Structures are given as C-alpha cells and as structure tokens.
Amino acid sequence: MQEDALTVYKDDDLRERRESMTDILASWDLEGALPDAAAMELVREYVAGVFGLDELIQKMADLPLYPERAA
C-alpha cells in the first residue's frame, strides 16, 4: 500500500504562507486581476499547507485571472 506524500510545514512556514498570500492578493489587486473561486480556493489550500508555492504557481498558470484579456 503506497501512501501519498504529504509535505509537513512548521508554524513558521504557516506565517510565511500567510504573508505570501497577502502579497499575491495585493499584486492581483494592483494588476487588475479578477481571481475566480477556483483561484481563491488554490490560495486557501496553499496557506493550509496542501502544497507549496512552486506548485501554487504552476496551478495558477492555467487560470484566467484577466478575463477581459481572454475575450
């Protein structure tokens, strides 16, 4: 039986992830990005420690943060 690998974060990592989330949201606001529910859920999962920043960036790459540019 193979278990899925789960990254365990320390409390310091939680603080860093929260700060990173604040930076991400501020950057989106300044750039005029409009994250949808899926994007916000990914950010919440990142803060909760489900995956790291590199994986968040990969997952976010395919999301339409700028709907007006997609038209």
Image (cartoon, rainbow, N blue to C red):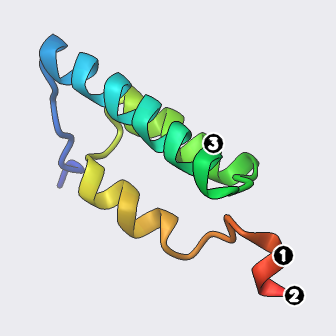
59 relative to 66 in the view: left or right: left
Identify the secondary structure beneath mark 3. Answer: helix
Q: Residues within 10 Å of mark 1 (few under 14, many from 20)?
A: few
Quarter of the figure with the C terminus: bottom right
Q: Which residue is mark 3?
A: 40
Q: Which residue is mark 2?
A: 71
* Amino acid type, label 3: Met
32 relative to 41 in the view: left or right: right
Q: What residue lies at 48% left-to-right and 73% top-to-bottom?
A: 61
* Amino acid type, label 2: Ala
Q: Which residue is mark 1?
A: 68
Q: Residues within 10 Å of mark 2 (few under 14, many from 20)?
A: few
Q: What residue lies at 45% left-to-right and 29% top-to-bottom?
A: 22
Cα separation, mark 1 vs mark 2, equals: 6 Å
Q: Position of residue 44 (x, y in %)?
A: 52, 33
Earlier residue among tags 2 and 3: 3
Cα separation, mark 2 vs mark 3, equals: 22 Å
Q: How many numbered marks are there? A: 3
Q: Is residue 10 above or below residue 45?
A: above
